[in-house]
Image (cartoon, rainbow, N blue to C red):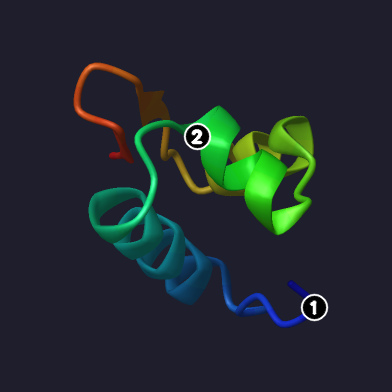
């Protein structure tokens, strides 16, 4: 996947939508979309969002 939203809040929304609708875990999403999990978590973490595996979403 080449085109992730560049705006961090849009990225947050996009990733949570994908987790809700298509992926059972963040690892599955990252593997399928060829994303670096650490970079994604750091990017969203800089806004105060943290991945919750029990709920399978960032919040």
Along the viewing direction, whichever of 43 and 20 lies nearer the viewer:
20
Horizontal arrangement in the rendering, residue 20 relative to residue 41 (left or right): left
Write down the residue under mark 1.
2
Q: Above or below — where is 36 with respect to 38?
A: below
Q: Earlier in the sequence, mark 2 or mark 1?
A: 1
The disc placed on residue 14 is none
Q: Residue 19 location in percent, x, y?
A: 35, 49
**Looking at the rendering, which quadrant does residue 49 occupy?**
top left
Q: Residues within 10 Å of mark 1 (few under 14, many from 20)?
A: few
Residue that sits furthest to the top in the current view: 54
The x and y percentages for residue 59 are 28, 39
Mark 2 sits on what residue? 26
**Residue in front for this viewpoint, 29 or 49:** 29
Q: Is residue 45 above or below residue 10?
A: above
Q: Looking at this view, is 47 or 51 the one in front?
A: 51
Q: Are marks 2 and 1 in contact (CB under 8 Å)?
A: no
Q: Quadrant of the N terminus?
A: bottom right
Residue 40 % position (x, y):
67, 44
């Amino acid at each position: 996947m080449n085109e992730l939203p560049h705006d961090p809040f849009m990225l947050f929304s996009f990733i949570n939508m994908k987790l809700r609708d298509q992926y059972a875990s963040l690892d599955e999403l990252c593997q399928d979309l060829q994303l670096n999990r650490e970079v994604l978590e750091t990017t969203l973490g800089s806004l105060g969002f943290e991945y919750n595996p029990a709920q399978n979403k960032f919040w």
